Image (cartoon, coloured by chain):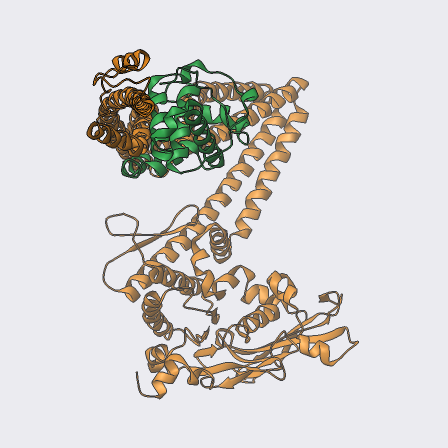
Chain colours: A orange, B green
């Protein structure tokens, strides 16, 4: 199956395009916002209508803003997308056209305006065109929505292929392929029939039988609920056990840290004491310095005293000159020792009196000087002691500083050790972790006890109760012949229901097996080298393992390739070779992995060549479709088209070849210049 | 030498700050320096800075017996000898007046340093050789 043409009218930012798509491999390239996503959205809308549109498509506007602006006052615009398909599996050409009137003010379609028509024309034009209106049923049969995610998708979301959303999609797809709806329906119908027979039987039986039936049903319900609860407890236990292991791992380091923390506390206490001692030592040192300093400042005055003493000694009035009492006696007697009559010789009297006065003054000064000098000497003696006390205080201060420094260094080291052990965890968090460990351990113990009790005691008890209730009920109802017949019919219906279930399981299993093999084989073939095994488990999770059974360490490129291989496997199993349309096929990979995936995709596309009328359309942006990409795919002779954003029209059109704007920049410009 | 009691009279300007200065300069383990040592310190600072203040009048003076110690008295006489000459010793009042003027001047200086830290200023400003050691140990 392949698209041969697409036409759009008023669809988002696309110009009213008319593009020939009749090629097996197409690169339809464009930068962001130029129309790649609009193209894919147009295909999705044409096939599946509004319900399958992404919400963003409607939010961003289904009709181009320029069209709206150019027709002011107009609120309703026709939108249409028309696709031509080649369908060799049915020897037909198919035309799909969906159109609707869109209310741009309310951003929704006008009710009942939508038309979707499918036209089927035999390829050899041997018959007339069959028209199916509405065409949704045809699409449901030939392009079921369950498969949409596997042929129409965004490469950037490839990594979600293996998450829970896709698991559901895979399961749905597998069930679709296996056509299992019918078997599920049968199972449900037979179970319903069995219940009907049972109800009739209970009505036929004695009232005691009805009560016994109620008891049996209650016992069944209780057993079912208890089993479900057990399942929940087991899951909870697994999760909590894992949590506890993680917490205990983290706590190993915390234990070591606790001891160090005790040492830190002791060291901090020590430090407080040493700092206090240092403060006292510093104060004492300052005191000693101030005391000594006073002497230094008074030194000039003391020096003057010393010099005055020397002068006094030289002038003869230090020490105190001779006693003047004898001289005073001479004066009072009026006779000098030389015999001069002092009473008669007045000048001699005056001379002596003055002499006595001078000597008296000198004596007083000498005495005062002696007293002061004596005290100064005492003071200077004290100065020596003060100097010593300064030295001693200085040494004490040095010692105190040293002690503080030593403890601070030790503390820094201890703190570094603690931080290293706690690996960035705060002490508070470490304590909380400890409490959490204790709590988890307690919860696990309780849970384990509960689980054991449920498994070993409660469930067996309930099973026994159910068996008893069932036997009691059977006994009461078997007594009645009509009831016996109904019982047989009920049992047959239940067997048929079980058979339908078994067929369903087999069908799904078959498809799953086939898918598994297909994926494994193709994945290994394209990657080359090591042999991997890919499995789809009971929950439809797709996982890849090495030959030894360990989870395979796949690169990002390999994981994305697995997604592509899966889509192809689906196509082959279903037998429907719908076109593959991928937006940004190289995803969000780095340069290295893009190269790797590019190589894979080349092989991938080559591998599809064997399929009848297969088609691949890649929508790439300029970072993906480089000259290297072009070289890689050149042997497959792809058709190159590009979206061109027309600035004046504010719309996108489709051109042939490589976008001329790209050729001016980056790798394309280098290629043109012959640099690469 | 004179036996007259040496009276401690604070500077007219800075009298109210004297108790605070007393506390700021208290030696380690005590709550205040003491009026006697404080007088001696202020007198020395005033002499070193050649700053004479205005002492309070005689009526304001409180007699503080501990000032009468030989060391302070000898220092006052030595200062008078240096500043006024030996003839000043003949008049004890002159000697004591000079001592009080220098003490008042010294106290005025200390009060002006209250915001920056009196203790640090005394240590660093007046004792350069010692202050080098002191500042390195203070860091």
In the image, is A306 to the left or to the right of A227? left
Which residue is drawn at the image coordinates 42% and 82% (left, top)? A665
| Residue A237, image x, y percentages | 42, 30
In the image, is A631 to the left or to the right of A509? left
Which residue is drawn at the image coordinates 47% and 84% (left, top)? A661
Question: In the picture shown, does residue A76 fall above or below A488?
Answer: below
Location of the C terminus of chain A (image quadrant): bottom left
Is residue A53 something one can see in this rendering?
A: no
Question: In the picture shown, does residue A32 fall above or below A250?
Answer: below
- Most distant residue in the front direction: A344
Question: In the picture shown, does residue A561 fall above or below A4?
Answer: above
Judge by depth and name the residue closer to the eye, A4 or A60.
A60
Q: Quadrant of residue A645?
A: bottom right
Tally the marks: 0
Which residue is drawn at the image coordinates 34% and 85% (left, top)? A671
- Most distant residue in the bottom direction: A673
| Residue A159, image x, y percentages | 43, 58
| Residue B133, image x, y percentages | 27, 36
Is residue B95 something one can see in this rendering?
A: yes
In the image, is A624 to the left or to the right of A415? right
Q: Quadrant of residue A440?
A: top left
Judge by depth and name the residue closer to the eye, A211 or A28.
A28
Judge by depth and name the residue closer to the eye, B126 or A408.
B126
Q: Quadrant of residue A40?
A: bottom right
| Residue A170, image x, y percentages | 47, 54
């Amino acid at each position: 199956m392949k698209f041969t043409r697409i036409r759009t009218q008023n669809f988002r930012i696309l110009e009213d395009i008319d593009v020939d798509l009749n090629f097996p491999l197409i690169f339809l390239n464009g930068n962001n916002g130029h129309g790649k996503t609009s193209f894919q959205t147009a295909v999705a809308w044409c096939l599946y209508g509004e319900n399958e549109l992404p919400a963003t498509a409607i939010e961003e506007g289904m009709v181009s803003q320029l069209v709206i602006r150019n027709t002011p006052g107009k609120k309703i615009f026709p939108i249409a997308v028309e696709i031509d398909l080649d369908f060799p599996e049915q020897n037909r050409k198919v035309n799909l056209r969906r159109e609707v009137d869109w209310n741009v003010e309310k951003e929704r379609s006008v009710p009942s305006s939508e038309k979707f028509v499918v036209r089927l024309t035999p390829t050899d034009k041997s018959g007339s065109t069959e028209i199916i209106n509405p065409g949704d049923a045809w699409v449901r049969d030939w392009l079921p929505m369950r498969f949409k995610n596997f042929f129409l998708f965004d490469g950037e979301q490839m990594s979600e292929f293996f998450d829970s959303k896709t698991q559901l999609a895979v399961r749905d797809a597998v069930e679709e392929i296996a056509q299992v709806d019918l078997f599920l329906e049968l199972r449900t119908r037979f179970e319903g029939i069995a219940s009907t027979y049972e109800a009739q039987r209970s009505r036929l039986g004695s009232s005691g039988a009805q009560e016994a039936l109620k008891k049996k049903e209650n016992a069944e319900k209780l057993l079912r609920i208890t089993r479900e609860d057990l399942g929940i407890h087991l899951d909870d236990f697994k999760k909590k056990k894992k949590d506890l292991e993680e917490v205990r791992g983290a706590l190993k380091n915390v234990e070591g840290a606790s001891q160090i923390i005790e040492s830190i506390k002791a060291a901090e206490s020590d430090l407080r004491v040493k700092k206090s001692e240092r403060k006292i030592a510093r104060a004492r040192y300052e005191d000693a310095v101030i005391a000594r300093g006073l002497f230094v400042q008074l030194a000039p005055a003391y020096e003057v005293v010393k010099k005055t003493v020397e002068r006094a000694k030289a002038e003869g009035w230090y020490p105190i000159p001779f006693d003047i009492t004898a001289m005073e006696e001479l004066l009072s007697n009026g006779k000098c020792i030389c015999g001069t009559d002092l009473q008669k010789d007045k000048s001699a009297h005056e001379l002596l009196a003055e002499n006595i006065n001078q000597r008296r003054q000198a004596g007083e000064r000498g005495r005062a000087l002696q007293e002061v000098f004596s005290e100064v000497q005492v003071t200077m003696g004290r100065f020596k002691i003060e100097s010593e006390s300064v030295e001693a205080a200085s040494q004490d201060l040095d010692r105190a500083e040293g002690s503080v420094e030593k403890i601070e260094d030790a503390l820094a080291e201890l703190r570094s050790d603690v931080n290293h052990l706690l690996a960035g965890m705060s002490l508070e968090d470490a304590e909380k972790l400890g409490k959490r460990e204790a709590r988890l351990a307690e919860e696990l113990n309780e849970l384990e006890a509960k689980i054991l009790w449920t498994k070993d005691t409660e469930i067996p008890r309930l099973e026994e109760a159910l068996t008893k209730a069932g036997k009691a009920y059977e006994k009461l109802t078997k007594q009645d012949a009509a009831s016996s017949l109904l019982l047989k019919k009920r049992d047959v219906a239940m067997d048929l229901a079980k058979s339908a279930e078994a067929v369903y399981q087999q069908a799904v299993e078959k498809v799953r097996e086939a898918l598994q093999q297909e994926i494994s084989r193709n994945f290994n073939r394209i990657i080359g080298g090591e042999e991997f095994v890919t499995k789809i488990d009971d929950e439809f999770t797709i996982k890849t393992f090495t030959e030894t059974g360990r989870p395979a360490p796949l690169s990002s490129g390999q994981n994305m390739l697995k997604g592509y291989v899966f889509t192809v496997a689906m196509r082959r199993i279903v037998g429907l070779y719908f076109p593959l349309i991928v937006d940004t096929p190289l995803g969000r990979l780095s340069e290295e992995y893009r190269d790797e995936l590019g190589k894979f995709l080349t092989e991938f596309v080559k591998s599809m060549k064997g399929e009848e009328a297969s088609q691949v359309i890649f929508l790439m942006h300029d970072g993906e479709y480089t000259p290297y990409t072009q070289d890689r795919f050149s042997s497959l002779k792809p058709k190159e088209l590009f979206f061109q954003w027309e600035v004046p029209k504010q719309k996108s059109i489709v051109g042939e070849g490589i976008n001329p704007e790209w050729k001016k920049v980056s790798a394309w410009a280098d290629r043109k210049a012959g640099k690469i | 030498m004179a036996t007259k009691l040496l009276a401690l009279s604070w500077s007219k300007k800075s009298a109210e700050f004297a108790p605070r200065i007393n506390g700021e300069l208290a030696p380690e383990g005590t709550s205040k320096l003491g009026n006697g040592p404080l007088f001696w310190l202020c007198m020395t600072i005033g002499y070193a800075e050649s700053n004479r203040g205005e002492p309070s009048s005689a009526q304001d003076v409180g007699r503080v017996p501990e000032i009468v110690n030989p060391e302070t008295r000898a220092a006052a006489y030595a200062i008078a000898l240096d500043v006024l000459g030996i003839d000043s010793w003949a008049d004890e009042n002159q000697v004591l007046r000079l001592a009080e003027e220098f003490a008042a001047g010294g106290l005025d200086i200390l009060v002006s340093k209250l915001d920056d830290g009196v203790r640090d200023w005394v240590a660093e400003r007046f004792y350069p050789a010692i202050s080098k050691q002191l500042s390195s140990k203070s860091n």
